[in-house]
């Protein structure tokens, strides 16, 4: 039997590379999926790939409680239940020392990465069937940090605190709550970070980052999606409050 047979999931940031890869994998494993994002064309592409019997889309700004709540309600109304929620939407911000870090950028990063994750948890855990799974996409820098990434690193560490609190609160319902911590992924989001951090062109910036990764390469979005699938399904049935390191050894 497929690992998510007859399960229903909601994924924020569902139009991005990791969100879309996860939606495709969940659907292949038997789930029906609501993908939420601010990028309507990207959502349409994901739903077009999966078909209306398997997927639905919700245009949602994750900082808006009503819009996040509507995405969760759509999953229940369209597919009858909710079993898995993946808080995946996120932004990076800028590279700057703390003394120069723009306050408006810091506030925006925390609003999307932390408030957005909180709002999905708030609405999804209220609607989720007992025995479900809540997954937060943190980052390798939710386990470590580096200079000039105060906004991003702060937000990704905060998600771990949110996860650990939620894991305690819903354990009596058999709902598991965990974070995933990807290292550098071969996608546009990561390449922009690398160019900003190094000042090099995309190819050279990627090489410089890979020199720091013990496995000496970027992950593919599909590899991260497979780790999310592990946390979503019964293979991780005795895991809650855990931080899953998928960083190619970068955080070791």
Image (cartoon, helix red, strand yellow):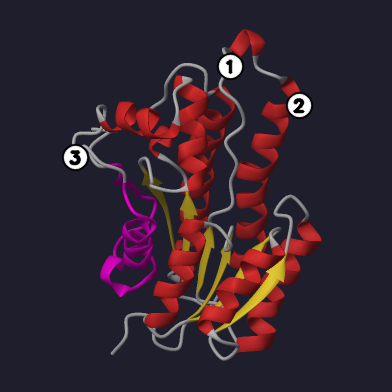
Instruction: Determine if residue 126 is in view.
Output: no
Considering only vertical position in the picture, is 234 above or below 244?
below
Q: Which residue is mark 3?
A: 215
Tell me the element at label 2. helix
Region of the chain picked out in magenta, as a range: 219-247
Q: Nearer the viewer, residue 181 or 196?
A: 196
Query: Mark 1, residues whose alpha carbon is within 10 Å: few (<14), some, or many (≥20)?
Result: some
At 66% across and 87% down in the image, what residue appears? 78
Instruction: Determine if residue 202 is in view.
Output: yes
* Image depth: mark 3 or mark 2 in front: 3
Q: Of marks 3 and 2, which one's residue comes earlier in the chain?
A: 2
Q: Of marks 1 and 3, which one's residue comes earlier in the chain?
A: 1
Considering only vertical position in the picture, is 180 above or below 35?
above
Q: Which residue is mark 2?
A: 104
Image quadrant holding the C terminus, namely top left
Expressed as whole percent of the image width and height from the top left, the position of residue 172 reads 46, 66
Q: Is residue 104 left or right of residue 75?
A: right
């Amino acid at each position: 039997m497929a690992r998510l047979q007859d399960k229903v999931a909601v994924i924020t940031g569902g139009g991005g590379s990791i969100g879309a890869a996860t939606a495709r994998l969940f659907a292949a494993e038997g789930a029906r999926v609501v993908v939420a994002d601010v990028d309507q064309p990207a959502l349409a592409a994901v739903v077009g790939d999966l078909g209306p019997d398997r997927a639905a889309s919700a245009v949602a700004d994750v900082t808006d409680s009503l819009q996040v709540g509507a995405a969760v309600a759509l999953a229940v109304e369209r597919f009858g239940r909710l079993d898995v929620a993946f808080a995946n939407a996120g932004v990076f911000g800028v590279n700057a020392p703390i003394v120069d870090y723009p306050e408006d950028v810091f506030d925006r990063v925390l609003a999307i990465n932390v408030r957005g994750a909180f709002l999905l948890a708030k609405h999804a855990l209220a609607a989720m069937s007992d025995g479900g799974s809540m997954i937060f996409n943190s980052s390798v820098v939710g386990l470590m940090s580096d200079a000039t990434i105060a906004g991003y690193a702060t937000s990704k560490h905060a998600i771990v605190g949110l996860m650990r609190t939620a894991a305690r609160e819903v354990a009596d319902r058999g709902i598991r709550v965990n974070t995933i911590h990807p290292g550098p992924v071969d996608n546009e989001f990561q390449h922009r970070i690398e160019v900003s951090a190094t000042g090099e062109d995309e190819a050279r910036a990627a090489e410089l980052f890979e020199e720091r990764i013990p496995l000496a390469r970027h992950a593919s979005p599909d590899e991260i999606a497979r780790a999310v699938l592990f946390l979503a399904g019964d293979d991780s049935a005795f895991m809650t409050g855990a931080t899953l390191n998928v960083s190619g050894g970068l955080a070791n």
